[in-house]
Image: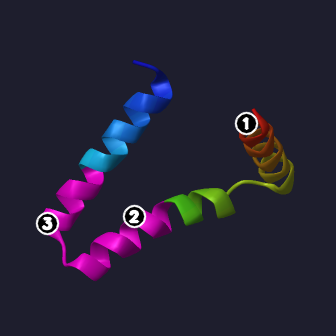
Amino acid sequence: MSLQAKVAVGGVAVGLVLLLLLPFWAAVLVMVGVPAVAYLTLDSSQRRRLRRVSRRELRR
């Protein structure tokens, strides 16, 4: 199993646990907010690199 698959499975598991433990709106807020905050903490060169890599993978 690749690292990306493990991360995806872990993310789904955490999302399901959040939906069970928190109200729906709070779980969605956490699931959307954490990646958004993580992206905003990157500096501009890291954001550029992330966008470039993402675009390159889409072209495959």
Give me the residue at 79% from left, 45% from top: 55
Q: Specify whether residue 29 is painted magenta.
A: yes
Q: Nearer the viewer, residue 24 or 34?
A: 24
**Amino acid of disc 1:** Glu
Q: Earlier in the sequence, mark 3 or mark 1?
A: 3
Q: Earlier in the sequence, mark 2 or mark 1?
A: 2
Q: Residue 41, located in which quarter of the rendered image?
A: bottom right
Name the residue beneath numbered marker 2. 31
**Amino acid of disc 3:** Leu
Check residue 21 in the rendering and tell me which mark sits there, or answer none.
3
Q: Residue 8, located in which quarter of the rendered image?
A: top left
Give me the residue at 79% from left, 46% from top: 46
Kindly check if marks 2 and 3 are in contact, taking CB atoms under 8 A apart as contact: no
59, above or below 2, in the image:
below
Q: Residue 23, located in which quarter of the rendered image?
A: bottom left
- Residue farthest to the top, as pictured: 1
> In the rendered view of the protein, which quadrant contains the N terminus?
top left
Kindly check if marks 3 and 1 are in contact, taking CB atoms under 8 A apart as contact: no
Q: Nearer the viewer, residue 49 or 54?
A: 54
Find the magenta span and give its range. Answer: 14-34
User: Residue 56 appears at what percent x and percent y?
Assistant: 80, 37
Name the residue beneath numbered marker 1. 57
